[in-house]
Image (cartoon, rainbow, N blue to C red):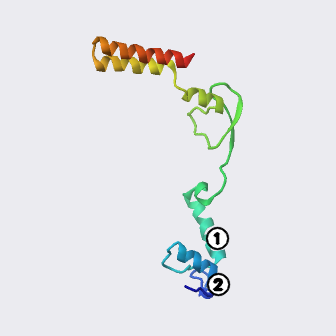
C-alpha cells in the first residue's frame, strides 16, 4: 500500500496540517482506524492541559520530583521520589531496605505457626525445627 502526504484540518484551531506518508505508515502499522484530528501544536497544548487534571507525570514521560526531607528513623537528610504526607514516617534508602529485609522473628513466627497448624506429631515438630534452624542460619 502506497501512502501520500495529505492535507487535514485541525479540529481545534481550524488550521491545515500535513499528515505525512511516514505518519500514515505508522498509523497503518499500529492499526489505528482514524486519521489525526489535531495539528501538533494543538495536540501538545491539549496534552499539557491533561497534566493539570491529574494524569500524573509518569503518563506524560516526565521525571519524578525529588523532595528533600529528614529520615524518621536515623535523622539524616535524604531525598525521596514523592511528596511526604503529614503524620507518616519517611525513611532514607538504608533504613527502608533494612526494614524490608526478612527478620529472624518473622521466620520464627512462621515456623511456630506451621507447627501449630500441622499438629503435635513428631514429624511436624521436626519440620518446625528445620524451619527454625534455617531462620537462624540466614540471620547469621
Q: In which quarter of the image is the C terminus?
A: top right
Q: How far from the left and from the top, in percent, is residue 137?
A: 53, 16
- Give the residue pinned by disc 2: 17
Q: How far from the left and from the top, in percent, is residue 55?
A: 55, 58
44 sits left or right of 119 in the view: right
Q: Quadrant of the N terminus?
A: bottom right
Residue at x-position 34% and y-position 17%:
115
Residue at x-position 59% and y-position 26%:
98
Of the two numbered discs 2 and 1 on the same chain, state the one appearing first in sequence.
Answer: 2
**Mark 2 surroundings: few (<14), some (14-19) or many (≥20) residues within 10 A:** some
- Give the residue pinned by disc 1: 44
Q: How far from the left and from the top, in percent, is residue 7?
A: 62, 88
Q: Is mark 1 on a helix, strand or loop?
A: helix
Residue 30 visible in the shown view: yes
In the displayed structure, 90 sits above or below 44; it is above
In the displayed structure, 121 sits above or below 35; it is above
Front-lying residue, 69 or 106: 106
Q: Is mark 2 on a helix, strand or loop?
A: strand
Question: Label for residue 110?
Answer: none
The picture quadrant where one finds residue 88 is: top right
The picture quadrant where one finds residue 16 is: bottom right
Q: How far from the left and from the top, in percent, is residue 53?
A: 56, 60
Amino acid at each position: 500500500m502506497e501512502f501520500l502526504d495529505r492535507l487535514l484540518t485541525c479540529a481545534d484551531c481550524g488550521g491545515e496540517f500535513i499528515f505525512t506518508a511516514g505518519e500514515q505508515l505508522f498509523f497503518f502499522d499500529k492499526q489505528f482506524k482514524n486519521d489525526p484530528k489535531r495539528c501538533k501544536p494543538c495536540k501538545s497544548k491539549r496534552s499539557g492541559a491533561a497534566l493539570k487534571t491529574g494524569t500524573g507525570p509518569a503518563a506524560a514521560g516526565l521525571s519524578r520530583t525529588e523532595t528533600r526531607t529528614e529520615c524518621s528513623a536515623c535523622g539524616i537528610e535524604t531525598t525521596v521520589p514523592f511528596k511526604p504526607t503529614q503524620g507518616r514516617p519517611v525513611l532514607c534508602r538504608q533504613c527502608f531496605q533494612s526494614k524490608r529485609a526478612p527478620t529472624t522473628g518473622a521466620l520464627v513466627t512462621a515456623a511456630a505457626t506451621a507447627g501449630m497448624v500441622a499438629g503435635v506429631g513428631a514429624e511436624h515438630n521436626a519440620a518446625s525445627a528445620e524451619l527454625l534452624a534455617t531462620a537462624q542460619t540466614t540471620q547469621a
